[in-house]
Image (tube, rainbow, N blue to C red):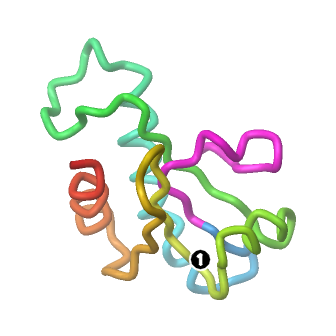
Amino acid sequence: MIIITDENLDILLTGNCGARWSGHCKKFQSEFDLLAQHYNNNNNNNNNNNNSDIENSNIKVAQVFCEDYISICNKYGVKGYPTILFLGEGKTKKEYNGPRNFNAIKKEIDEYLK
């Protein structure tokens, strides 16, 4: 899992903005970990990748803890936890508000990249 800080903010594409104390964030964490494992691991092993739905090797799934980096969360207008944002170079920021599970978020990421 990539943890977003002020120093590495530019790599973010799909991010979970949350707080360690939030019950909703704790419940969602295992699904978010699956997304990070899926995209971040496939980015590192693209030559062994048989998944046709991962066409963009620049996808990064990352997390920021708002209690540590409130300036980042303020910059992106985070008001509640967890907040899932899609940020892409040359694309409009999108807040994801759908079901909080791997398959639903993955589908939305794939659509966002088209």
User: For the image shown, how many numbered marks are present on the structure?
Assistant: 1
Q: Which residue is mark 1?
A: 25
Residue 13 x, y percent position in the rendering: 49, 49
Residue at 63%, 68% in the rendered image: 17
What residue do we see at 52% from left, 78% from top?
A: 27
On screen, residue 56 above or below 34: above
Position of 89 relative to 96 (above/below): above
Placement of the N terminus among the 4 image quadrants: top right
**From the viewer's perspective, is 68 left or right of 94?**
right
List x then y, in percent, for residue 68: 86, 64
**Residue positioned most to the top:** 47
Seen at 56% across and 84% down, the residue is 24
Q: Nearer the viewer, residue 96 or 33?
A: 96
> Residue extending furthest front?
90
Q: Position of residue 110 (x, y in %)?
A: 24, 52
Q: Which residues are magenta?
A: 1-16
- Residue 52 lies in the magenta-colored region: no
Figure check: 80 above or below 12: below
Residue at left offset 65%, top offset 79%: 78
**Residue closest to the eye, 53 or 102:** 53
Q: Along the horizontal axis of the image, is 9 left or right of 49?
A: right
Counting from the top left corner in percent of width and height, residue 64 is at 70, 60
Decide which of 89, 27 is in the foreground and name it: 89
Amino acid beneath label 1 = Cys
* Relative to 5, 30 lies left or right: left
Pointer 1 local density, CA inside 10 Å: few below 14, some 14–19, many at least 20: some
Compare residues 113 and 104 and report the one nearer the observer.
113
Local secondary structure at mark 1: helix
Q: In the shown orientation, is residue 9 left or right of residue 36?
A: right
